[in-house]
């Protein structure tokens, strides 16, 4: 479990609120000390000397409470650490997805995570996990495509395009590795949809550059980018375009 996950867990624990009746009672006792004194006088017990047994008992209780708290923290850390190693099809895999959502990851980053899961189950020959892993990967790509279509229509800045390119390249790297392992995901409908979104991004970037004033070197890079675009090598074309924007 990394630091960010632990911070999120602590934040969730902080959200636990005390019983409202207890809060009201404590508030009334603080604001009305006279009434509190009266209650104490009614239930006042005969004076008792504090002995060594009482002190030891208090220490034991405090130690038990501290131990229980530490145990709970270690259990939480252990569970969150464990789910990081679960794969699609495993019992605790849904917990892993919940943890990812608390980390504010983009849909494209989550799609990359699913490609990582798929590579791992294929490499380790976890036959029972392969089909669920492929299903999860396809679903994550569909979510990423929908999100990209919406987000880039509102923000097509250089930083946003660079972030998209970085994640897509990582997914494509895993895609090539899977092909060497005998699993092809290139022809799936979901990957075709991702290619279509990348094509739109590249087209928009090319259109903007054609209206800009470029040096001779930049003009040549743009020509190279267009050639790559015609070959449907959208990531490579986008990399060329970003060279001009630098």
Image: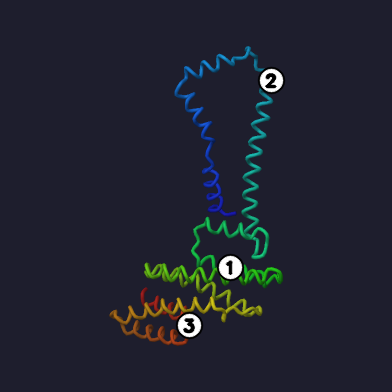
Sequence-first disc among 2 and 1: 2
Name, please, the residue furthest toward the front. Answer: 21
Q: Is residue 62 left or right of residue 5?
A: right
Q: What number is the disc on residue 103? A: none
In this rendering, the count of numbered labels is 3
Mark 1: few/some/many CA within 10 Å (<14, 14-19, 20+) = many
Residue placed at 51% from the left, 27% from the top? 25
Secondary structure beneath label 2: helix
Q: CA distance from mark 2 to mark 3?
A: 80 Å
Residue 218 % position (x, y): 35, 82
Which residue is under mark 1? 114
Quarter holding residue 40: top right
Sequence-first disc among 2 and 3: 2
Q: Is residue 22 left or right of residue 72?
A: left
Residue 147 % position (x, y): 46, 68
Q: Nearer the viewer, residue 102 or 229?
A: 102
Q: What number is the disc on residue 52? A: 2
Which residue is under mark 3? 233
Q: CA distance from mark 2 to mark 1?
A: 60 Å
């Amino acid at each position: 479990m990394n630091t960010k996950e632990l911070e999120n867990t602590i934040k969730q624990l902080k959200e636990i609120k005390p019983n409202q009746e207890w809060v009201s009672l404590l508030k009334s006792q603080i604001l009305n000390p006279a009434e509190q004194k009266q209650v104490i006088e009614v239930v006042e017990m005969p004076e008792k000397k504090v002995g060594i047994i009482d002190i030891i008992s208090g220490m034991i209780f405090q130690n038990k409470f501290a131990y229980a708290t530490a145990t709970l923290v270690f259990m939480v850390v252990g569970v969150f650490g464990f789910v990081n190693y679960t794969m699609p099809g495993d019992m605790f895999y849904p917990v892993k997805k919940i943890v990812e959502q608390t980390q504010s990851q983009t849909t494209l980053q989550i799609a990359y995570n699913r490609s990582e899961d798929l590579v791992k189950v294929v490499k380790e020959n976890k036959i029972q996990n392969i089909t669920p892993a492929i299903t999860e990967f396809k679903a994550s790509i569909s979510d990423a495509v929908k999100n990209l279509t919406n987000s880039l229509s509102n923000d097509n800045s250089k930083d946003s395009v660079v972030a998209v390119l970085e994640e897509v390249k990582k997914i494509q790297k895993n895609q090539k590795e899977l092909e060497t392992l005998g699993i092809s995901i290139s022809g799936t409908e979901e990957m075709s949809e991702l290619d279509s979104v990348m094509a739109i991004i590249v087209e928009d970037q090319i259109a903007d550059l054609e209206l800009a004033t470029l040096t001779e070197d930049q003009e040549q890079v743009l020509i190279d980018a267009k050639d790559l675009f015609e070959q449907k090598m959208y990531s490579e074309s986008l990399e060329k375009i970003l060279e001009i924007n630098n």
